[in-house]
Image (cartoon, coloured by chain):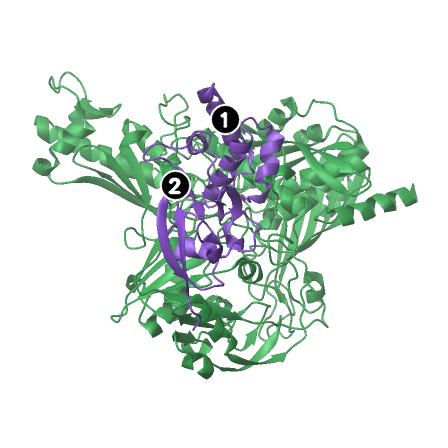
Chain colours: A purple, B green
Amino acid sequence: MTRKVHVTANVNGDAIEFLCEPQQTLLDVLRNEIMLTGTKEGCATGDCGACSVVLDGRLVASCLVLAVEAQGKSVETIEGMAKGDRLHPLQRAFLEHNGVQCGICTPGILIAARALLERNPDPTESEVRFWLAGNLCRCTGYDKIIRSVLAAAREMREARA
Amino acid sequence: MTTILEQSGYNSDRKLNVVGTTPVKHDGMDKVTGRAKFGADLMLPGMLVGKILRSPHPHAILKSIDISKAEALPGVKAVVTRADFPEHPEGTAIGDLSRNVIAREKVFYEGHTVAAVAAISESIAKKALKLIDVEYQVLPHVIDPVAAMRTDSPILHDYLRSKGVTGAENRRTNVIERLELGMGDVEAGFKQADVVVEREFKTRPIHQGYIEPQACVANHTEDGQTELWCCTQGHFVVRAQVSSILNMESSKIRVIPSELGGGFGGKTTSYIEAVAVLLSRKAGRPVKIVLTRSEVFRCTGPVAATQSRIKIGATRDGTFTAAEAEMVFQTGPFTGSMFYNAPQAVFTRYDLKNAKAVAYEVVSNRPKVNAFRAPCVPQAIFAAESVIDELARKLRIDPIDLRLKNAAGEGYTTIYGQTFGPIGVIETLRAAKKTAHYNAPLGPNQGRGVAAGFWFNRGGETTASLSVAPDGSVMLLLGTVDVGGSRISISMMAAEELGIPLDKVRAVVSDTNGLGYNMVTAGSRATFASGMVVVDSARKVINELCKRAAMIWGVPEDGVVFEEGHCRPASSNVGEFAPLSIADIAKQAGATGGAIAGHSELNVTGAGPGFGVHIVDVEVDKETGGVRVVRYTVVADAGKAIHPLQVEGQYQGGAVQGIGWALNEEYIYGEDGRLQNPNFLDYRIPVASDVPMIDPVIVEVPNPKHPFGLRGVGEVPVASTLGAIANAVTDAIGVRPFELPMSPPRLLKLIEQARATG
């Protein structure tokens, strides 16, 4: 049997430890060891974006990251997006503008969209579309997702102004 | 008591407080916080990982399977093969289903399930698969449906004889059925025509492309009971299938549906559930199976490739005199394409007197074809609407005017014998013509296309219950899985009917033990049919509330009426009583006979046919053959939009799925019959930067058979897309594509051919 590796990481602000096989992905460990199933697997090849998380400030497809690479790093997943009962403006916007249909792509899209707005608080429609081009959605046709992101960006800018 | 089947109570003057508004959907919160539990999200103590061994060959005799080495691997708790499954005769519905779930005599496609293991970890399960020895005798295969029809083609099933073909009793064949529909006299009709256009079209096989791979957890206990968690469009159907594949009684199988991460028809049947149940039975522990994306592409879903010939005749003023269609639909090794929809739908929206439509379903060495959003209709409509576009060009008539000239209306009897009530063909065409989009100028290298479409909309077996809590709030138990916002829309109808705020109503989807049988969520039926049984349940509850109020007041039952959420005396003759709210009555339910609830079980009829028109502008790069969709409008008749934002989402999502189908998506098979692009990188569905905003135009021609007038909205939005985009590309490049997808290499060839011929 493969010897497991001990890893410590910070997940959504909590210091955690886990054991994993060397070939296990971060996605696999998040879902099946730490039981944070909000991060989804749609392809496991980095093509669909459903597993998007932020690793030390960088937006990544967690299916393409080995779990051992998380050693000493911070991981942000959908479960950490709301602060207590206070939703992130993106989460509120997706509810209000019906940016959610079946919901399987939603966690990845929210994580990716937040990463965009942190870098570019005032993106154009085109910039949102290209930033989210790595996040597949088969239900919505993207229209209401894009509108949700633009609405959240507007709200966040107004809150800052 | 009269059910709503006999009396919908539809009233166009009814004042609506909830229906037609756009509240946040109740299932939204869990979906934006990551709490929502999808198929792969359930974890049980002691759970094992299930993995499937699949055939590398598209067609082979399965000579032997040796599992002894796999069984001996430490950590492996169960291995199952065909030997573990009960026998079911070939060529029967259950025989087909069971052979698709696990191969018996032969494997019929690359990826066909041959064996499965359950182990304590994924890595051990994968190792075990490699230790299974399978001996195959490889046979010649056939994938193209037209090639499969030829007499010298490899034959998949020795027992198969074509239905609907005379003299076929002794002929081995791959043609499952030939279906012919007709009306009037087609030959005479073509003789009256001044112009006749006849063309042939091809579409390639595609996949539904849901983002959530199939997943399930089976937990079988020693007393023969199974709990089965899975992502499906119809958990009652999963129960029925597992029950018949494994010869288990339905009451011993409790299926709990997860949130569904997309299905689009692809999750209307089961693949892994019976396998997981058997693994769990053998191992004595819960077993989870989650498919990989590659497995999803190679073994589930897919959609028929087609070849079709369409002929339409018209007089100089544009009146259609006759129409004829001949269409071939590919299925996998077993029936399942729902090809019979195509001859019914191909011309249905036009006021034709003379028409003939023939369709074939043909087996091939692909996975068993499954439903996809308006199954087999977009391919047929693509062909028909392309021919109509050509007629409009030949006759120099505006394409919408030509369609309006021939639009079917109320009272028209279709080629399949349905006489239409109020329908929205004319209304949607007129609305399309009035849009700013249709009247806007085009840029350079751009073209505009329109196409009209149709979907039947379905009803069917549906059940629900509605319970009033002691505090007057209301719980709905639904039997149809929510695939696109049905829970909120149905809750809104319940709130409207009961005259209470939406916030007091919560809907959950029941497991299979909680309600009577329901058909799958498909055919655009869930909001319509579950809405019917919920309104029926609400009316039963209202009846009961009036009885209880009569008891409380000590007056006759007919002395009480229910208005705006309250029981009131029917007249001053009954007596002076303050109105009782639902909460007032519910509080006293114990004293007046117990809890107040209603339930309804109906085989729902009265679905209203749906029609729509798409307008699309494309820009074609003549150097690369690349197509950019620059503007898109979907006009469709919702009957009544219960929650307009949800309806818009259906219109937009349908259109973008169609854009992928028209421009990019196709299964690419090698000479060896293996799929070469089973991943989202090489099978490219539209991404956000591929498409523009999609403008929805909701037309409302009420369906009087529904209490609120609604029709289905899930499938009409994809029906017209392929045709509209093909017509727009034709407008842009001056030459018509007859084959999908209109991918850059294919289109470039067409542009170059046109250049060469001048």
Calculate the distance from the C-alpha at mark 1 to the C-alpha at mark 2.
21 Å
Ranked by sequence position, the earlier of labels 1 and 2 is 2
Q: Quadrant of the N terminus of chain B?
A: top left
> Residue B199 vs residue B488: left or right?
right
User: What residue is at 27 percent from the left and 27 percent from the top?
Assistant: B500
Is residue B169 at least partly visible in the picture?
A: yes
Residue carrying label 1: A151
Residue B277 in the image: above or below residue B443:
below
State the image coordinates of residue B437 (x, y, percent, origin top left). Answer: 66, 25
State the image coordinates of residue B688 (x, y, percent, origin top left). Answer: 59, 38
> Residue B601 vs residue B199: left or right?
left
Q: Nearer the viewer, residue B242 or A15?
A: A15
Subunit of label 1: A
Q: Nearer the viewer, residue B456 or B118?
A: B118
Residue carrying label 2: A80
Q: Residue furthest front?
A: A72
Is residue B413 at least partly visible in the picture?
A: no
Residue type of the residue flagged with mark 2: Gly
User: What residue is at 51 percent from the left and 40 percent from the top?
Assistant: A112
> Residue B184 vs residue B748: left or right?
left
Per the image, label 1 sits on a secondary structure element best described as helix
Badge 1, how many Cα within 10 Å: few under 14, some, many 20+?
A: some
Q: Nearer the viewer, residue B751 or B284?
A: B284
